[in-house]
Image (spheres, grey):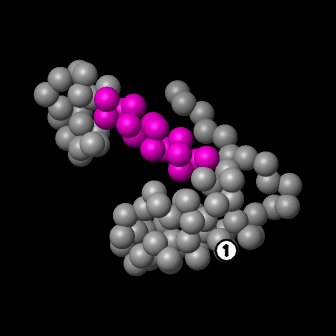
């Protein structure tokens, strides 16, 4: 299980920090796969309730998974027709 202290570097061991980092990256990979597949329902599984979605233009208060799914359905609907994928760069 991923713990806050592990993410913040307050862990008791380097192994624990490495495990937390791997879990966080794995969760992010699953989220990006769901988004890349334009699967709003799968994306919603990566949010806790309630949630906030912050965009450059506005902030959305999302009280539950249904609200997350509905918001992402709209975002995905509004995406360019030639959308292929979103890339992330690890530095």
**According to the image, label 1 marks what residue?**
74
Please give left or right for residue 91 compared with residue 76 in the image.
left
91 over 30 or under it: above or below: above
Q: Is residue 30 magenta?
A: yes
Find the magenta span and give its range: 19-33
| Residue 59 seen in the current view | no
Apparent side of residue 45 relative to residue 20 in the rendered image (left or right)? right
Which residue occupies 31% across, 29% down?
Answer: 19
> Residue placed at 67% from the left, 50% from the top?
36
On screen, 46 above or below 28? below
Residue displayed at 75% across by 70% down: 78
Q: Farthest residue toward the left?
A: 12
Classified by dominant secondary structure, the portion drawn in magenta counts as: helix
* Relative image position of residue 54 (x, y in whole percent): 49, 65
Q: Nearer the viewer, residue 63 or 1?
A: 1
Magenta run includes residue 50: no
The part of the image, by quadrant, that contains residue 80 is bottom right
Image position, residue 58 (x, y; %): 54, 72
User: For the point 27% across and 29% down, which residue is it?
Assistant: 17
Mark 1: few, some, or many residues within 10 Å (few <14, many ≥20)?
A: few
Position of residue 61 relative to residue 22, above or below, is: below
């Amino acid at each position: 299980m991923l713990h806050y202290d592990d993410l913040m570097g307050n862990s008791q061991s380097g192994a624990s920090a490495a495990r937390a980092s791997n879990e966080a990256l794995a969760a992010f990979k699953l989220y990006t796969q769901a988004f890349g597949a334009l699967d709003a329902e799968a994306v919603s599984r990566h949010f806790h309730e309630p949630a906030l979605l912050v965009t450059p233009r506005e902030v959305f208060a999302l009280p539950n998974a249904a609200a997350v799914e509905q918001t992402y359905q709209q975002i995905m609907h509004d995406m360019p027709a030639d959308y292929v994928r979103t890339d992330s760069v690890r530095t």
